[in-house]
Amino acid sequence: MTFGLFKLLLDGLWITIQLLVFSAALAVLIAFTAGLARLSRRRAVRFFAAVYVEFFRGTSALVLMFWLFFALPLLGWQLAPLWAGTLALSLSFGAYGSEVVRGAVLAVSPGQREAATALSFTPWQRLRLVVLPQAVPEMLPTFSNQLVELLKATSLASAVTIGDLTFQAQSVRLATGESAQVYGLILGMYFVIAFTLTRGMRLLERRAKANLGLGRLVTGPEAPLGSEPPTAPAGPPPLPEPTGHGQGGGI
Amino acid sequence: MAPTDSATEERTPTGGTTPPLIRFDRVVKRFGGVTVLDELDFSVAAGRNVTLIGPSGSGKTTILRLLMTLIRPDGGSITVDGDNLTHMVRRGKLVPADEKHVRPIRKKIGMVFQQFNLFPNMRVLRNLTEAPVRVLGMDRDEAEIRARELLEMVGLADKADAHCAHLSGGQQQRVAIARALAMRPKVLLLDEVTSALDPELVAGVLDLLRDIAVSGDVTLVCVTHEMGFARDVSDQVLMFDAGRVVESGPPEKIFSDPDHQRTRDFLRAVR
């Protein structure tokens, strides 16, 4: 493989990372919106959120991508390929994520909400100051799994001519015929990104737990006032490996 | 259903006339098909600590939860400090109160729960300062000074920066009491606050509450099974059964010489 061809793979890697970052950000936004909407007091809001979730959870992300890419322009709305891919992925993963958000919010003890009401917090303050800070740490293990699933799902974008890592690998393979080498290389690349993601998420989880005073017991002098989120523990505490209990990807 | 719009002068069960701080007017509450409160009437005068006693399922906790607006009544009205907690006037009509109407009235009431319900995502000090800052609009420095005073009062000044999860049950409950007081409520609702505590931790919490009761800054409404405590802190004891007040009176009377057989049976059973 020449340097020029390798450069092609790096371009693809960059597109894959963009797809991942944009879809993840949008999916999180959608997940929180839809997940909280499903818990709304208003029936109409709950209904529309449920329709969204059920529809996109039950649809193939690939077909959705095809539709956005090939069918939507017929209706007079042309999306840039990268955005069509991002939208398809985030709509799918947002639907899965909304269930994670909903579950985690419901898992916060009702007593917490009651205590927040007793202190006269507004509904929004209850959510923002009390419920979500406790629910988010619960979401992290599942989100971590879904993030890896999302990374792998970005390869679907190659089917709609987005020049991601998989797409470029196909081009290189066509040019050189070195299938084993090329696909082996990008397998490794996907793995390295995925591994980085899971490590990062584990760090977040550990911080979130420490923030709730869980995990490692803080002994000795307490942190001085005003140094709110406790810094990550110096040594890796003997926490059990997070067990994967997320749903599968949206393919 | 005829909710009153203002507190009127009323004879308290112990005699004398003071405007009631809390007034229940034919309050009905049902859970499923079960009527927990059946047209309940009672009132509490300001500065007179009240204890609700009675068998479990008699509606005591329901009364506290109604007052804290954690649940809504199915009928009747509740007045707190002259404000109608359950109804408001909209376009000349009396309609069920909404969140906005309830909010300023709710600020006059604080509650301590059986399960403490401290916010684990905040350190101890933050548990005490967050509501005064966000709800009362207090300056954060001022709120912290006040919070430290309260922690001093409950004997936990050294725990200001601790995680709630690292405190014992008794310590958590004392923080919860301080947190409620930080809002300077007129009424403090105590819902079986020692029931979830290990026996050796109960005395510390009750001693603290005795001090608060004596201070007279806040009117206590307690639901408790600690009859000794009830006798010490209450000015008035209400005996409940099946959603109704069986009898009420000063603790000396209720605990020594109750009028009703139902009260005698209950007191014998809990001793």
Image: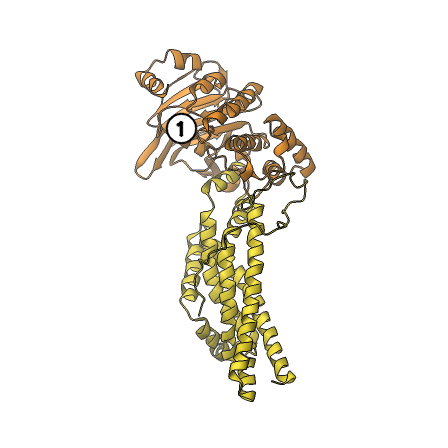
Which residue is label 1 attached to?
B60
Q: Which chain is yellow?
A: A
Eyeballing the image, is A209 above or below B227?
below
Left or right: residue B29 compared with residue B210: left
**Colour scheme of this structure image?**
by chain
Eyeballing the image, is B215 above or below B174?
above
Tell me the quadrant of the picture where the C terminus of chain A can be found. bottom left
Q: Residue at x 49, y 66 (%)?
A: A149
Q: Name the residue type under label 1.
A: Lys
Observer able to see residue A25:
no
Question: Foreground: A74 or B154?
Answer: B154
Which of the chains bears the disc numbered 1?
B
Q: Secondary structure at mark 1?
A: helix
Q: Position of residue B201 (x, y in %)?
A: 50, 27
Tell me the quadrant of the picture where the N terminus of chain A can be found. bottom right
Observer able to see residue B31:
yes
Question: Foreground: A115 or A48?
Answer: A115
Eyeballing the image, is A128 above or below B78?
below
Q: Position of residue B33 (x, y in %)?
A: 30, 38
Q: Position of residue B251 (x, y in %)?
A: 43, 15
Q: Position of residue A179 (x, y in %)?
A: 51, 83
The image quarter containing residue B73 is: top left
The image quarter containing residue B134 is: top right
